[in-house]
Amino acid sequence: MDNLKRFLKKSYGVEIDSEELIILSSSILNDLENNKEICIKLFEWVRDKIKYKLVRVIGALGTYKRKSGACIDKSSLLIALLRINKIPSRYITLKANLIAKQPISERYVNHCAVQAYINNRWVILDPTFDPSFDKTFPKAQFDKPGWWDMKDSLIHQERFEISKLEMDITSRSYERSTPWKKMIENIKSHK
């Protein structure tokens, strides 16, 4: 467990000492004690209650207050809630090779998700898409292949490879954002 301690600490955008997030965690869990059940409950809450929206990156607390966020912010909120409950967690990136029906500016897109250490192994959790995306992407489930494994979708074909923490920034608007740069530094430190 010593090598997992760094995945329990506060970091930029993962405000585990926030009283609001501690209270939120407690209200979601209602005294659950089993780590897997805690993980599932927190994952489902972030996935379903926080709307997916491409907005300025503001970290876990800001995402909770705003009630929306992109993949990195929803991941930050889930990581904070997991760490508050002493469940080691970290960022991962999913690299998408998009074959679109219409031209797109980037062929490869990085997508942020979460790994949580449960029952002596890392499991992937992708809280990004809330229920409003159910017709486009299947609802992500705890520790099961997600939308990144889809062969076909209504929008485009996708092939995703999980690449731990290889973050090359593809969004120019995020690239110029100071909070985004700090979040990227935080993600890279999770190697």
Image: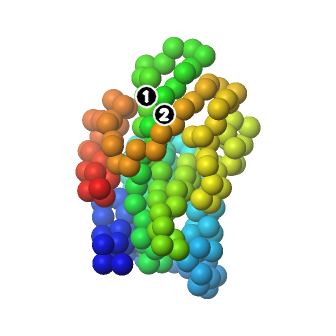
Vertical arrangement, residue 32 with respect to residue 121, above or below: below
Mark 2 is surrounded, within 10 Å at the Cα level, by few (under 14), some (14 to 19) or many (20 or more) other residues, namely some
Q: Report whether residue 106 is seen.
A: yes
Q: Give the amino acid at mark 2.
A: Ala
Tell me if mark 1 has few (under 14), some (14-19) or many (20+) residues whose alpha carbon lies within 10 angstroms of its own.
Answer: some
Q: Is residue 158 above or below residue 132?
A: above
Using the image as rendered, state which of residue 161 and residue 88 is in the foreground: 161
109 lies left or right of 173: right
What residue is disc 1 on? Answer: 108
Q: How is the rendered protein coloured?
A: rainbow
Is residue 67 visible in the rendered image? The answer is no
Q: Quadrant of residue 147?
A: top right
Q: Are marks 2 and 1 in contact (CB under 8 Å)?
A: yes
Residue 96: image tag: 2
Mark nearer the N terminus (2 vs 1): 2
Residue at position x 74%, y 37% from top?
135
Label 2 – label 1 distance at C-alpha: 5 Å
181 to the left or right of 161: left
**Residue 133 x %, y %:** 67, 41
**Which quadrant of the figure contains the N terminus?**
bottom left
